[in-house]
Amino acid sequence: MICNLKEYDCWFQRRACAPLARLLSSVGLLEQGLILENAAMELRALLTKNFAVLSLAAEGKDAGTLIGTIAGLNARLGLELPSTKAEGFVIKVSGARIIIAGQDEAGALYGIYRFLSLLALDKIDEGIEIIDAPATPFRSLTHWDNISGDVVRGYAGKSLFYKDGRVDYDEQRVIDYARLLASVGINRLAIGGIFGTGPGQLLITEAMLPDVARLAALFRPFGVKLLLNVKFSAPYTLGKLATADPLDAAVAAWWKERADLIYRYIPDLAGFVVKADSELEPGPFNYGRNHAEGANVLAVALAPHGGEVVWRCFVYNCVQDWRDRSIDRARAAYDIFKPLDGAFAGNVLLQVKFGPYDFQVLEPVSPLFGALSKTRYTLELQVTQEYTGQQIDLCYLPYNWERILGFDTRYGLRSTLRELLVDGEIAGVGAIPNVGLDHNWTGHPLAQANLYGYGRLCWDPCLSAELIAREWSALTFVDARVADTVSGLLLRSYPAYEKYNAPFGVCFMVTPAWHYGPNIEGYEFSLWGTYHRADRFAIGIDRTATGTGYVTQYAPENAALFGDPATCPEQLILFFHRLRYDYVMKNGQTLLQNIYDTHFEGYDEVKQMLELWKGLKDWIDEPTYSQVLARFECQLANAREWRDQINTYFWRKTGVADAKGRKIYE
Ligand code: GCU
């Protein structure tokens, strides 16, 4: 059987039939509510479309399937459904009835999507009872779309929301996007761009707020609340005040007034996202103020409305002189934000990039995690594949996110990022999405797995990347043989990408600005502060206590672990240490030989992945097959370029040949 992928529908593919069709043919809802009614509508529509069950609005209590809130169903039907956490749900299947009940309206919606995915995976049987709830309340995506319609670091076509300087969208497509987000539990969406060129400024004017309100209304029935990216300098640029100084009374009044105006249009706005003092964006430093002072003025304005300020910690000196060795960019976020722990208002959420640099393929987890104990903060990831192959190369990101979530900060007893999230010490997760107007949403059809995986991991950070890969593949590719091969490809893809990229955590050997493909010294003499300082003998930055001191920002056990090359995880060793090329690694080979080996291996892996894909030719529809094939071919060319440029570079530096005699270009 040929697997006929409807790419637009992502993980909602058509199935032959559904078990329990008799019970599913009538779906009853006994309560009212915007999200609840949408949940019932979604369930009926998707049962009809994907499972060929004609699902009708039904006769109250007698319906085969009942949806509602736990409290509502208990009261109306005399049930004793257990209560769960906010946004959680209970699914109960008996021979006589199916019940999908939410702790609240959103919970019921999440329950119906979970039910549908279990149905598709053939995991709904009589007698099952599932109780589940999200680990964390804040599960967000931040769009970097500009009002021109271009998407910053977007690899899947133009913006879903803007065109030619206006808010302009295909309403059905936005609804379909809201469904995708809700189906994996995303409940916050930030719009408004990140830079001066972004629409953040204009969206909060009376001219555009009605448009934003209309967008918010499309997301609302799916439990997704909007956030707005705003510019710190807005009181000055928009409000025409003389300053945007956060301690200026007129500035505080301006923000308050603006917040009041915005909430008249969007009463359930989740708040603002701010990128301040970051990569030349204006911020509190312009006025000699610190970041708590900067964030708090916005927090005070939003507080009466229940809004939050998501304040990004991506702050560093981006006009560094490469000659100056006294600055280490990796230290910046901790140096700036740790001393302010406890100084932020209660409705500020600091958003911390997972690593100290910038979404690199291999970099350590930021030392801020676990170190902030009096401040609410979130983990920031990147779903769009900026440094990870730009949706040309297959790169399954949950593989890395699982590693990040498993990082043990060594603060307290339950101290991995996943435990901190589950326990509420980390207040949520944010990321930049990978979607655009391309018909298949993500450019590379298999990059849909990253969006899916992001939502699933926010919901349950204890899920494994492997389980998510299998789940997504089985939902997306109805044929089991195809699904198996695809999940295998996903799981191989990140380690392969890592191997042909910058070696052992040294980072930034990528083409400047564009960030695809190798350029080994592209950042070496730039302003951005990301240097590897390779010479004839050695490579890497000494970030130990006697070097830049970065390692001392970690809890003592981790400082010791990373600080000693003998115990430092080898895949990150060049992030922490400057090593000679003849440094002997755990496998008995030199650092140089390991660089050669990993780069040959990375390329070979891609070659094998391409062959595996070719093996699916007769099992998958032609357009999907060819599209992915074309991308694998580009990936192979990219891996070849990385392999040869890296190997040649180090061969030229050292004059030491590959011990295995493979071809290295002169
Ligand atoms: C990266 C990216 C930028 C983006 C920045 C951010 O540096 O290249 O385009 O602005 O991240 O996180 O804000």
Image: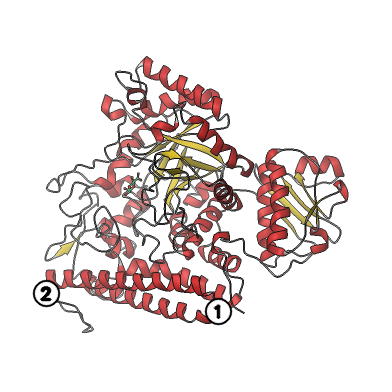
Q: Position of residue 559 (x, y in %)?
A: 32, 51
Amino acid type of the residue tagged 2 in the rendering: Gly
Question: For numbered disc 1, what is the local secondary structure?
Answer: helix
Q: Is mark 2 within 8 Å of ligand 1?
A: no
Q: Which quarter of the picture shows residue 360?
A: bottom left
Residue 131 at least partly seen:
no
**Left/right of residue 231 with respect to residue 588 in the rendered view:** right
Outermost residue, front side: 164
Q: Which quarter of the picture shows residue 601?
A: bottom left
Amino acid type of the residue tagged 1 in the rendering: Trp
Q: Position of residue 385 (x, y in %)?
A: 39, 57
Q: Residue at x 59, y 37 (%)?
A: 217
Q: Residue at x 33, y 69 (%)?
A: 499
Mark 1 touches mark 2? (CB < 8 Å): no
Q: Is mark 1 within 8 Å of ligand 1?
A: no
Outermost residue, bottom side: 661
Residue beneath label 1, please?
A: 619
Which of the marked residues, 1 or 2, is nearer the chain's N terminus? 1
Q: Name the quarter where the C terminus is drawn.
A: bottom left
Residue beneath label 2, please?
A: 655
Q: Nearer the viewer, residue 180 or 277?
A: 180
**Left/right of residue 660 with respect to residue 105 in the rendered view:** left
Q: Residue at x 28, y 44 (%)?
A: 331
**Left/right of residue 423 with respect to residue 563 in the rendered view:** right
* Residue count near mark 2 (Cα–Cα under 10 Å), binned few <14, some 14–19, many ≥20: few
Q: Position of residue 327 (x, y in %)?
A: 20, 44
Q: Which quarter of the picture shows residue 195?
A: top left
